[in-house]
Amino acid sequence: LVTRACRALSVVTNDTSDEKMWKKIEEKLDRINELREHIFDHWQIREILSEELRQAHSEIQIAMQRLVDITDNKTEQLVMYHKKVNLITFSVVLIALVMFSFFIFRNITNPIKELTNGINIFKKGGVVDITPKTQDEIGTLTTTFNEMIQYRQKVEIELLKSETRFRQLAENINEVFWIVSPDWNKIIYISPA
């Protein structure tokens, strides 16, 4: 306000005419009075709002205390209820996890047992063809095992044919020939001739 009044006086002092100067002073004083009334109105509104805020704050505190009193009685019951719900949920999840683990364990161990039985039969000279039940690693292992058995059977057939040819050659030739180890310490074969 003081700054505005000083500006008003500086404007007034630049005018040479007294009448103009007093007119401007009156206008500036009127404006100053308007501003003062406006500020006073704002101050009164502020005081009224402050009082209403204090009352509202105390009412809120009373309501909060009532709410705390009401909820204190229910809180213990609610906590016990949540404990029961959590225990039931945990039990259901644990049972589901055990059942799921058993299912997974069974789906993994059964194909492995079948593969192990097939290997034992093959070791004893039996013919084995295991059908893969899944397309996972165990199914791939079973397929590879079947391919290995087929390859081994082909190799055994070729070896048998080779041995038959060798035996026919060795039995029908009149000259003596022999096969020894590379270090000449062991005789591997001597022809009947």
Image (cartoon, rainbow, N blue to C red):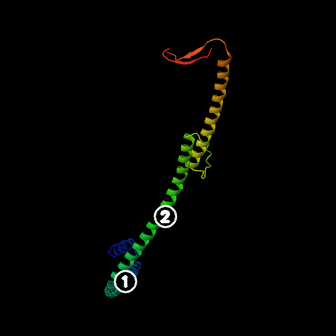
Please, what is the three-letter code of the amino acid marked with disc 2?
Answer: Met
Label at residue 99: 2
Question: Which residue appears farthest toward the top when viewing the image?
Answer: 175
Q: Which mark is residue 83?
A: none
Picture quarter containing residue 172?
Answer: top right
Which quadrant holds residue 36?
bottom left
Q: Single out the mark in the foreground, 1 or 2.
A: 2
Q: Could you say which is closer to the camera, residue 182 or residue 35?
A: 182
Q: Give above or below for 181 relative to 96.
A: above
Mark 1 → mark 2, Cα distance in angstroms: 74 Å
- Secondary structure under tag 1 reads helix
Labelled disc at residue 42: 1
For mark 1, does the 10 Å Cα neighbourhood hold few (<14), some (14 to 19), or many (20 or more) residues?
A: few
Q: Position of residue 34 (x, y in %)?
A: 39, 83
Residue 73 percent location from the top left of the image: 32, 86
> What residue do we see at 49% from left, 60% from top?
102
Residue 186, image x and y in percent? 50, 17
Q: Is residue 180 left or right of residue 60?
A: right
Mark before the other along the chain sequence, 1 or 2? 1
